[in-house]
Amino acid sequence: MDNDNKNKYITSDDLAEQTKIILGAIDGRFNKVDERFNKVDERFDRAENRLEEVRDELKTDIKNVQDELYIVRNELKTDIKNVQDELYIVRNELKTDIKNVQDELYIVRDELKTDIKNVQDELYIVRDELKADINNVQTLIDGYVKAQEDFKEEFVIVKEEGKQMKQVFKDKLGVEIRAF
C-alpha cells in the first residue's frame, strides 16, 4: 500500500461508489442466480407439462383398458350365457334320450318277459308231450317185453314139444331127427 493511500480519507462519495460497485456485482450474481432459477423453472414447467401429458396419456390408456375390459366382460357374459343355453339344450336332449332309452328298455323287457313266458309255455307243452311219448314208449316197450316173454315161453313150450315129438318119432317110428 502506498503512503498516499494511507493518508487519504474515504469520503461518502467513495463509499457510495463502492456500494454501487458491490451492489452491481451482487446484482450480477443475483441475475445469474435468477437465470439459473429461470432455467430450473423452465425445466420444472416442462417436466410438469410432460408429467401432465403422461398423466393424461395414462388416464386415456386406463380408460381404454377399462372400455376393453367392459367389452371383454360383456363378450364373456354372452359366451357364458350361450354355453349355459347350449348346456341346457343338451341336458334336455339327454333327458329325452334317456327317457326314450328307458321306454325302449321297458318295451324290450316286456317283450322278453312275453317271449320267456311263451318259451316256458312251449317247454311245458313239449314236456307234457315228451311225458306222453315216454309213457307210450314205456307202454310199447312193456308190450314188446311181454310179447318177448310170451314168445320165450312159447319157444320153450315149442322146444319141449319138439323134443317130445322127436322122442315120439324115435320111439314109435324109429326115426331119429337131428339138427345139422
Image (cartoon, rainbow, N blue to C red):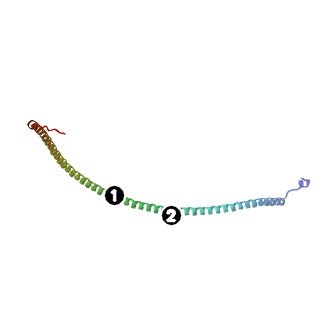
Amino acid at pointer 2: Ile
Q: Nearer the viewer, residue 165 or 87?
A: 165
The answer to whether residue 89 is left or right of residue 52 is left
For disc 2, the marked residue is 71
Say whether residue 145 is left or right of residue 49: left
Query: In terms of depth relative to the viewer, which is nearer, 16 or 146?
Result: 146
The dot on residue 8 is: none
**What element does badge 2 sit on?**
helix
In the picture, measured across the screen, residue 138 lies left or right of residue 38, that is: left
- Point out the image quarter for the C terminus: top left
Please report whichever mark, 1 or 2, sits nearer to the chain's N-terminal start. Answer: 2
Please report the residue visible at 69 percent of the width from the left and 61 percent of the height from the top: 43
The structure residue drawn at horizontal position 73% and vertical position 60%, both measured from the top left corner, is 36
Residue 158 is situated, as x and y percent measured from the top left of the image, at: 12, 40
The one nearer the camera, 141 or 44, is 141
Tell me which residue sits at (69%, 62%) in the image: 42
In this view, the residue farthest toward the front is: 174
Callout 1: few (<14), some (14-19), or many (20+) C-alpha neighbours within 10 Å?
Answer: few
Q: Residue at x 62, y 63 (%)?
A: 53
**Label 2 Cα neighbours within 10 Å, binned few <14 / some 14-19 / many ≥20:** few
Q: Position of residue 124 (x, y in %)?
A: 21, 51
Q: Residue 97's image quarter?
A: bottom left
Q: Nearer the viewer, residue 175 or 108?
A: 175
Residue bearing the label numbered 1: 101
